[in-house]
Amino acid sequence: MFNSAAKLALGAAVITALAGLVHVGLTGDRSGYVILLAAAAALAIVTVANVVYVAPPPFSPAAVPEAEGHLPADTTDVARPSLWPPVSALALGLIAIGMATGGGLIIAGLIAVVLTALAWLAQAWREHPAWTDALTERLNERVVIPFVLPTVVVALIAVAVVSFSRVLLAVSQTAAWIVALIAAAAILAALAWLATREEMARSALHVLVAFAAVLLLASGVAGAVAGEREFHAHHEELHLKIVAADNEFNLSRLRAPASSGVTVEVDNQDEGVPHTFSVYTRAGGDPIFVGEQFAGAQTFEYHFETPAEGRYWYQCDVHPRQMFGIFDVDPPVGSDEGGEGSGSGEASDGNDH
């Protein structure tokens, strides 16, 4: 029959196959692609087995002659539908992916295999005819609540955090914000929908949770395969100050390291006169940074990132023939090209030509 285990196995097979396509598309690694397709095929076989297999009818104690003075005992031991076989297949698939991509996934897969085996064993014990409610209560009080439940919760949180972080680190900074907002909205919408349901079958809830877990894990694997985006080292922003008075800049030369944030504070002392601060490749050349126009008397700060090493031109776009200077960009901070003084900001007056 097409039970919950079959549905979950089918969904996992589809997701695993898609993960294989994403993997080969991003990395070109055919070995990982083959491993994922093999895992998808195994899950498909599990699906077919669950659909085709029909459990034999349970043993009826009424058909057995009863001895006088003894009550009949139910000795039925029929396996019930279980989610643990496909979950075990996913854990083994995680180990296989880890062997192709990195050691971290192998450790996560081994932990998943151990937890799945323990949960599967616990289900087999609970379904045995000799199991009683008293044993269930004793096991919950002595093992599940104090040890198993906290461990599972911490493990699930760790897997969710690591998987989601892989996704956020693989995309751009702007896309990371968008993905995080969409994920938060989806979680809130799902919880709100569950809260409005008066009654929901346990099997349906299990399938929903398992599907969300597989989706998150598959996204984390795809993010890990894609790798992290490039991060740039953060340096303290350089602050330069220049005064505009009588339609002239008090400095004819500015200096800053390449590829770093810089703040140029312009003190406009010309009452009611607008000024700007802009940087160009040369006098009359292409713009590097074009600043906003503002009138005095007041100060205004311009924030921008310096270009590559070289000599550039800065000016007031309102008075380009009167207010201009040279903007020297040194090698980046930490570079050996510029000697000892490389990377420090500097501003000099008109004698520094």
Image: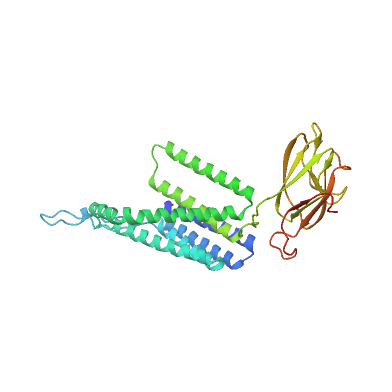
Position of 240 with respect to 12 (left or right) is right
Position of 30 with respect to 105 (left or right) is right
In the rendered image, the vertical position of residue 273 relative to residue 344, given as above or below:
above
The residue at the point 53 percent across, 64 percent down is 97
Give residue 293's quadrant in the image: top right
* Residue at far top of view: 272
Q: Position of residue 61 (x, y in %)?
A: 22, 55
The residue at the point 72 percent across, 56 percent down is 344
Q: Position of residue 275 (x, y in %)?
A: 80, 38
Q: Which of 331 and 286 is in front in this view?
A: 331
The C terminus appears in which quarter of the rendering? Answer: bottom right
Q: Position of residue 73 (x, y in %)?
A: 20, 55
- Count of marks, rendered view: 0
* Residue at far front of view: 351
Q: Can residue 316 be seen in this view?
A: no
Q: Where is residue 25 in the image (x, y as percent from the top left)?
A: 64, 60
* Residue at far left of view: 69
Q: Can residue 350 be seen in this view?
A: yes
The residue at the point 64 percent across, 60 percent down is 26
The residue at the point 86 percent across, 39 percent down is 319
Give residue 292's quadrant in the image: top right
Q: Which of 189 and 153 is in front in this view?
A: 153
Position of 34 with respect to 304 (left or right) is left
Position of 39 with respect to 243 (left or right) is left
